[in-house]
Structure formats: structure tokens, C-alpha cells
Image: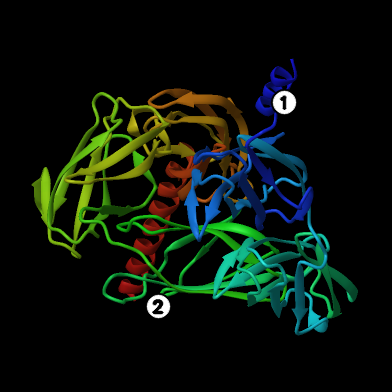
């Protein structure tokens, strides 16, 4: 019975023992930690022990290390003991973890992951400075890892609204660092103030994990409500400035000068700059910062030229008279770096209209233009007499390897012409003293494609002559080619001297006016003629008698 109990107890007592003096350890996120272990073989024979570990609530990355090497098992002789370690990297998430290490038997270690104020030393070279609003403060800081393992540092900043912080390590912007055990490293913090900040004291907190350093900034001048500047020079691949390149910034548009330079004045903000010019590939510069009272110089901006590109230059609005040919000068420029041929056409012409391109006096349907050159042409558009006044939208097209288009608004107009045509075409009327003269004629709209409205008819006579009647005095409207008869009665004074007189007939419409003249030849009455002849005859007889008497003496 005693032998059986002894055997059972011998089986229950482990032949190996895994031990550690550490039951709880504290680490910072990312820190490399080593836990010393002791493994003892209490058995009577050599044993191989397989090593493993587990963690809760999340996985911890680690490995067993013996004699500077990673191992997954150990071989121990009877009653042999060996020291080794478990090396792990503390999780990035803070909190409590349970780590279980096993080699036949097992041990548990509580791992508390968190940030320690004493793990990192931060030494800023500047703690306070004076700036104008919109300036950038540059501060160098030395970070020293006081731990015996790797320490990862997250960089952040608490700054006033509109301010920005950036961290740089060897000129490269960073937001997280990894410091080896005992390492010291100098980094740079750039604090960008807002140009709209008022004058006063401001505090910026630079954070390194849980450690914070306060930087005081005094703003001694504000640029609130001031515009800022963007300066740039746009060039082509040959280094020549690109003139008249359009720069779109927000809702505003600017253009480069003759040498390709541009100065953009705009309210503070962050903008995308779109640069475009006919014959060049469009370019966009994103996230350009503008601060009030400050200049952001973008330097040289290169625009690449297109191989094929053309432009048509011509008037965008032209008037054309019905029944005539309208000649419109235009120029086609080849702005690409390759020669090209262009087929010419006009789209949108109504029925009956014709369009002809001319180079000099020669009608052409296409042109060849070398790179960088231009051709001056004439576009002749014939408007038929049957057309009516209207607005016609046309597209003038030059189609080659690239297509150039120009919009042309053709305003079709008629002619305004008002005439008075006397009945029978007689512009001379004969009358006697004291007569009443009746002048008949037609008021005609002699224009093309137009309507004349509110046509007033009036007559102007010499001296004390009297206009007895104008019928009608007002003609409401006349379409092109229409006419209406008018009657004008004029009274000639009885004592009017026989002669030629002019009567003016005036026509006034809303659109145009004209004046015509009728000649009135006034003659003496018939009895006056005979009386005159009698007086002349009596004078001649008297003269004859007188001569005879004198002759006798």
C-alpha cells in the first residue's frame, strides 16, 4: 500500500520546473522587453522541453532566446538547470495583458503597457518667441530615450485654430519616431501661425506620446483681412515665358504677363491653381497656401507644348445685310510644334445661305500651316434676299490633327429705306396764282426685310402758302415693298409772283426718315396776259406816232 502511494506521488511531482522572479512588468508601447527564465530538469534522464507562449486579450509578438539565439526547445540532462529569456515587443495599444510562458510547466506574467513620463526626455532649444501673424516658428528639440529598449514616439500638437504644426527629421516630415535604447535625436518642429491671428500671446503644446512641452508665441502684428500673394513664372521647355496663360484660383482668374510671370492676390486660404494656355497641356498645382500679408513664391512652373493645336481668331459677332455678301476676316494659328493641314467648314448655315473661304482672291477649302505660323483668310457669307432678320449661331471649324473652332453670331439685318414716289413720276407741277394744288403720291418702304412703323407725313411750303390737307398724316406700318397713297393739298396765294417754287414732303418713321421735293411752277392768270400784251401794243403805237411827228419837223 505504501509503495503504491509513493508511486502516485512520484508521478504527480513534475520532473521540470520553469521559474521567473518577475510576476508583473511595466512597458511602454513598442518597447522591447526581456523576461529572464530558469528551466530545471529534476528527472533522472535527459529531456527535451518544447517552449511556447500565449497572451491575452491580444497577441504579443515575442520569442525565446538562449545564448543570443532564438530557440523553440531546450535539451537538459538529468538535474541540469539552464537560464534563458523571453523577449517581446510591448503592444502599441495601452492596457493590461496576461502573458503565459510554458515548458512542460508554465509561469504567468502580467504586462502593463502604458506611457511613462520618465521614458522620454525632451529638450526644446526655444520655449518662447515673437512673430508676425502668418510667420512660421522653427524650433529644434532633442529627444532622448531613457529606456533600455526601443521606444516609439508619436508626435502631435495642440495649437490655436488656423495654426498648423509639422515635425521634421533630417528634412523629412514625420509623425512617429522609433528611438533605440538610450538614443538621442534632434528633430525640428515648424509651427505655422495664421495670418488672421490677432495681436496677443498664444500657447502651443507639442506632444510626444503622453509627454508635453509648452511653447509660448507672442504675435506682435496681425494681417487680418489682408490679401496674400502667390508669385510664379510659367515657361515652356525652351525656357521662354508663356504669356497670357490663364491661372484659375478659386473663383478668380489671372493671366501671366509677357515674360510669363504672374502675381496672384487673393484672400488667405488653401487653393488649387489651374494653369492653362492654348497649345499647352494643362497643369494643376494643388494645396497652395496663401497667408494675408505674405508672399508664397512657387518659382518656375513648366508647361509642356502640344504637338497639334490650332486657334481661330475672328470677330464673334457680325452683322450681315439681307441680299448681300458679308466678308469676315479671320486668322488660323498653328500653335503646336508640328506642321498640320486643316479642312475648313462652317456649321449652322440655314438653307439658301452660302459660305466661302478665301486666301487672297482664291477660294479654298483647306490650308497647310507650318508650326508657329498663321494664315489670314476671309470668310464670305451670302445672305439670300428671301432671308428675314434673325440671329444665327454658326461654328467656324478648321479640322486637322487637332480641331480648332470659333463661334460666330451672325446678326441678319435688313435695310431701312423710305421713299416718296409722286403719281406718274412727276416731280414738277404747273399752277396759276390763287390755285389749289393737289399732289398725289405713294409712301413706300423700299428697304429689305424690315418693317417701318409710325410713318408721319408732312409738307413744308414757301412763305404764306398754305397746306390745306395731308391725308393720311400717319401710316401705322409698312412691310418691305409695301406702299400707301397720300394726298397733299396746297393753296397758292393769288399775289404769288410767277416763278418756280419748292414744296418739301417729309416722311418720318421710327426707324428712318427722308425728305423729297416737288417743284411748283406758278404762272399768271390768262386775262393778265392779254392785258399785258395790250399795254405793250399801246406803247409801241404811241412810240410810232411820236417818231412820225418829230420826223416832219
Residue topped by disc 1: 9
Crowd class of label 1 (few under 14; some 14 to 19; many from 20; radius 10 Å) = few
SS at badge 2 = loop
**Mark nearer the viewer, 2 or 1:** 1
Asked if residue 165 shows in the view, the reply is yes
Quarter of the image for the C terminus: give it: bottom left
Q: Which sits in the foreground, 64 or 97?
A: 64
Where disc 1 sits, the SS reads helix
Q: Nearer the viewer, residue 551 or 395?
A: 395
Q: Give whichever of discs 2 and 1 has the lower sequence position.
A: 1
Q: Quadrant of the N terminus?
A: top right
What x and y, as percent, mark residue 449?
39, 29
The colour scheme used here is rainbow
In the depicted structure, whether residue 211 falls above or below residue 424:
below
Q: Look at 41% across and 37% down and name the residue there.
A: 429
Q: Position of residue 282 (x, y in %)?
A: 39, 55
Lateral position of residue 60 relative to residue 393, left or right: right
Crowding around mark 2 (Cα neighbors within 10 Å: few <14, some 14 to 19, many 20+) is: some
- Point out residue 44 in the picture as x, y percentages from the top left corner: 56, 39
Q: Residue at x 42, y 64 (%)?
A: 245
Q: Is residue 77 found left or right of 200 in the rendered image? A: left
Q: Nearer the viewer, residue 526 or 52?
A: 52
Residue 228 lies in quadrant: bottom right
Q: Identify the residue shown where x is 10% and y is 46%.
A: 364
The answer, for residue 439, to whether it is visible in the render is: no
Q: Is residue 154 rendered to the left or right of residue 43? A: right
260 to 349, vertically: above or below: below
Q: Residue at horizontal 46%, vertical 60%?
A: 246
In the picture as drawn, the residue positioned furthest to the top comes out as 1
**Which quadrant holds residue 43?**
top right
Task: Return the residue at label 2.
Answer: 259
Query: Quick check: marks 2 and 1 in contact, CB under 8 Å?
Result: no
Amino acid at each position: 500500500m505504501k509503495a503504491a502511494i509513493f508511486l502516485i506521488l512520484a508521478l504527480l511531482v513534475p520532473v521540470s520546473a520553469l521559474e521567473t522572479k518577475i510576476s508583473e512588468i511595466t512597458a511602454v508601447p513598442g518597447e522591447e522587453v526581456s523576461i529572464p527564465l530558469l528551466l530545471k530538469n529534476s528527472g533522472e534522464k535527459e529531456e527535451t522541453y518544447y517552449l511556447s507562449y500565449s497572451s491575452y486579450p491580444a497577441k504579443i509578438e515575442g520569442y525565446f532566446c538562449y545564448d543570443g539565439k532564438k530557440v523553440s526547445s531546450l535539451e537538459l540532462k538529468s538535474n541540469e538547470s539552464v537560464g534563458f529569456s523571453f523577449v517581446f515587443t510591448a503592444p502599441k495599444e495601452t492596457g493590461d495583458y496576461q502573458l503565459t510562458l510554458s515548458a512542460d510547466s508554465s509561469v504567468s506574467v502580467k504586462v502593463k503597457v502604458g506611457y511613462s513620463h520618465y521614458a522620454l526626455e525632451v529638450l526644446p532649444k526655444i520655449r518662447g518667441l515673437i512673430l508676425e501673424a502668418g510667420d512660421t516658428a522653427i524650433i529644434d528639440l532633442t529627444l532622448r530615450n531613457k529606456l533600455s529598449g526601443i521606444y516609439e514616439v508619436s508626435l502631435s500638437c495642440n495649437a490655436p485654430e488656423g495654426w498648423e504644426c509639422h515635425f521634421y527629421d533630417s528634412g523629412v516630415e514625420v509623425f512617429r519616431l522609433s528611438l533605440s535604447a538610450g538614443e538621442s535625436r534632434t528633430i525640428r518642429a515648424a509651427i505655422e501661425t495664421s495670418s488672421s491671428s490677432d495681436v496677443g500671446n498664444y500657447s502651443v503644446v507639442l506632444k510626444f506620446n503622453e509627454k508635453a512641452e509648452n511653447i509660448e508665441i507672442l504675435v506682435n502684428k496681425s494681417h487680418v483681412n489682408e490679401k496674400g500673394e502667390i508669385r510664379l513664372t510659367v515657361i515652356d521647355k525652351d525656357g521662354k515665358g508663356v504669356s497670357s496663360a490663364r491661372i484659375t484660383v478659386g473663383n478668380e482668374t489671372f493671366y501671366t504677363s509677357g515674360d510669363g510671370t504672374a502675381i496672384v492676390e487673393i484672400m488667405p486660404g488653401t487653393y488649387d491653381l489651374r494653369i492653362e494656355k492654348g497649345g499647352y497641356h494643362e497643369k494643376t498645382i494643388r494645396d497652395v497656401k496663401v497667408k494675408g500679408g505674405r508672399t508664397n513664391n512657387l518659382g518656375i512652373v513648366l508647361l509642356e507644348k502640344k504637338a497639334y493645336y490650332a486657334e481661330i481668331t475672328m470677330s464673334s459677332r457680325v452683322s450681315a445685310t439681307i441680299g448681300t455678301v458679308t466678308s469676315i476676316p479671320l486668322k488660323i494659328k498653328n500653335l503646336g510644334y508640328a506642321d498640320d493641314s486643316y479642312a475648313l467648314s462652317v456649321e449652322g448655315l440655314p438653307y439658301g445661305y452660302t459660305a466661302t473661304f478665301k486666301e487672297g482672291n482664291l477660294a479654298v477649302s483647306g490650308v497647310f500651316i507650318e508650326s508657329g505660323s498663321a494664315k489670314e483668310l476671309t470668310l464670305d457669307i451670302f445672305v439670300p434676299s428671301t432671308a428675314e432678320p434673325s440671329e444665327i449661331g454658326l461654328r467656324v471649324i478648321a479640322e486637322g490633327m487637332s480641331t480648332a473652332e470659333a463661334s460666330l453670331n451672325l446678326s441678319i439685318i435688313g435695310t431701312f429705306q423710305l421713299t416718296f414716289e409722286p403719281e406718274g413720276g412727276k416731280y414738277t407741277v404747273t399752277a396759276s396764282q390763287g390755285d389749289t394744288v393737289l399732289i398725289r403720291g405713294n409712301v413706300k418702304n423700299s428697304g429689305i426685310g424690315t418693317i417701318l412703323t409710325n410713318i408721319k407725313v408732312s409738307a413744308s411750303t414757301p412763305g404764306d402758302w398754305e397746306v390745306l390737307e395731308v391725308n393720311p398724316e400717319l401710316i401705322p406700318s409698312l412691310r418691305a415693298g409695301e406702299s400707301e397713297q397720300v394726298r397733299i393739298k396746297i393753296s397758292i396765294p393769288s399775289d404769288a409772283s410767277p416763278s418756280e417754287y419748292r414744296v418739301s414732303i417729309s416722311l418720318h418713321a421710327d426707324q428712318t426718315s427722308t425728305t423729297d421735293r416737288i417743284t411748283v411752277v406758278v404762272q399768271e392768270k390768262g386775262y393778265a396776259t392779254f392785258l399785258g400784251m395790250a399795254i405793250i401794243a399801246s406803247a409801241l403805237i404811241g412810240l410810232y406816232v411820236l417818231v412820225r411827228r418829230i420826223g416832219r419837223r
